[in-house]
Image (cartoon, rainbow, N blue to C red):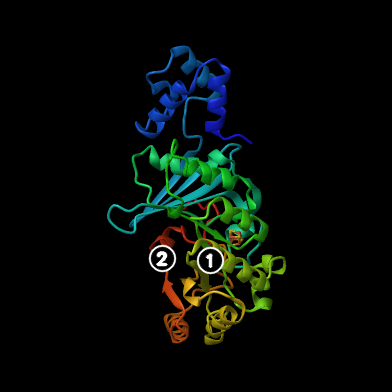
Amino acid sequence: MQSKFEKLKSFIMDNGYSMVEYKSILNSIFRKKIWKYEEIVGIPVDLKDNIMQNFWNEICSINPIYIKNYEKANKIIFQINGWEKIETVNLSFRKDWEDYCISSQCWCNFGCDFCSTGKMGLRRNLTVEEITDQILYFYLKWKKINWISFMWMWEPLSNPNIFNAIKELTDQELFGLNQDIITISTIWIIPNMYKLFDTFPNINLTFSLHSPFTEQRTKLMPINAIFPLYDVIKALDDYIKLTGKEVYLAYTLINWINDSKEHAEEIFNLLHEHSSVDLSFYHIDLIPYNSSSENSTYYKQCNKQRLNNFIEVLNSKWISNSVRSQFWTEINAGCWQLYNAIK
Ligand code: SF4
């Protein structure tokens, strides 16, 4: 399916105009940050009228219906075409730095047992413009775009539109962003990941591990039965060999479920026995579990002592690790907390 900008280009050409008019419109959007087609100057009036009749007047197709702020985190719920809702999170970790976690699907059907989003089922894949408009919304507000993570609410590699969305985000005529400020966080769909490496070799990867034990990981994350861990490790090694980049393994620590010293030991064993690259290419991104009113009955955040014990084991094995900061969980804007809660 064509994106908004591809359709616009075809429409302009089909109506007897040229790339001059198309580039003039892009210039108004991406340099002057114009929100409505009617505000664009420098193109023929009849072309502008025609565009407004065929593309509506609003350049950004998604509409914020709920915004919640906490410290330096903003959670926005957008209404998209068809009255569905998606969530986007904007984080300002430090001065002059704006980080975005954007959605690629409307909810998710992968059924990870600890995840609120996964309990909602998949409504549909987002279109290219519904993905990129989450960034366009902030771009038109003159906000910086320092980092984009396809994280939080979906499995990005299960939506084929992700490829065209990244293409547009990195297109120098459009957003002009670098691949290396984009992270794909995935539970892993192996056939699509080779396409991802080949197409965007500079993109960053985070793989959701959450347990090194096959039986437990399959219980927590049913996808493990289709793409087993050992196959994934081989694929991650291939990514490292191709790109020379580090891979993050996201690991949520759930109290008395997957936060034991044995789990930490087994992460080392898994990498040591099954990876063929230097283990310094793997970094464990520890995330104390984020509960929400939808998922807190069984799963709880690990306590500080168990977190420290876990880190101690990883450090003793020289496995690089860090603990993700969490200030945005206060507004249910963290991993596994997104379920369109307007509160
Ligand atoms: S963790 Fe990700 S892939 Fe799993 S159910 Fe939640 S949103 Fe879907």
Q: Residues within 10 Å of mark 1 (few under 14, many from 20)?
A: some
N-term-proximal mark, 1 vs 2:
1
Any part of residue 139 in sight: yes
Q: Amino acid at mark 2?
A: Gln
Q: Residues within 10 Å of mark 2 (few under 14, many from 20)?
A: some
Q: Please identify the residue farthest to the left as the structure is shown.
A: 95
Q: Which residue is mark 1?
A: 240
Rendering coords of residue 112 (x, y %):
63, 65
- Establish whether ligand 1 lies closer than 8 Å to the Cβ of label 1: no
Q: Which one is in front in this view, the residue at disc 1 or the one at disc 2?
A: 1
**Along the line of sight, the residue nearer the viewer: 145 or 53:** 145
Task: Specify the quadrant of the image occupied by residue 225.
Answer: bottom right
**Along the line of sight, the residue nearer the viewer: 224 or 165:** 165
Q: Which residue is mark 2?
A: 326
Task: Specify the quadrant of the image occupied by residue 193.
Answer: bottom right
Q: Please identify the residue farthest to the right as the structure is shown.
A: 226
Any part of residue 283 in sight: no
Rendering coords of residue 10 (x, y %):
57, 25
Q: Please identify the residue farthest to the top as the structure is shown.
A: 46
Q: Is residue 123 above or below residue 282?
A: above
Task: Specify the quadrant of the image occupied by residue 277.
Answer: bottom right
Q: Secondary structure at mark 2?
A: loop
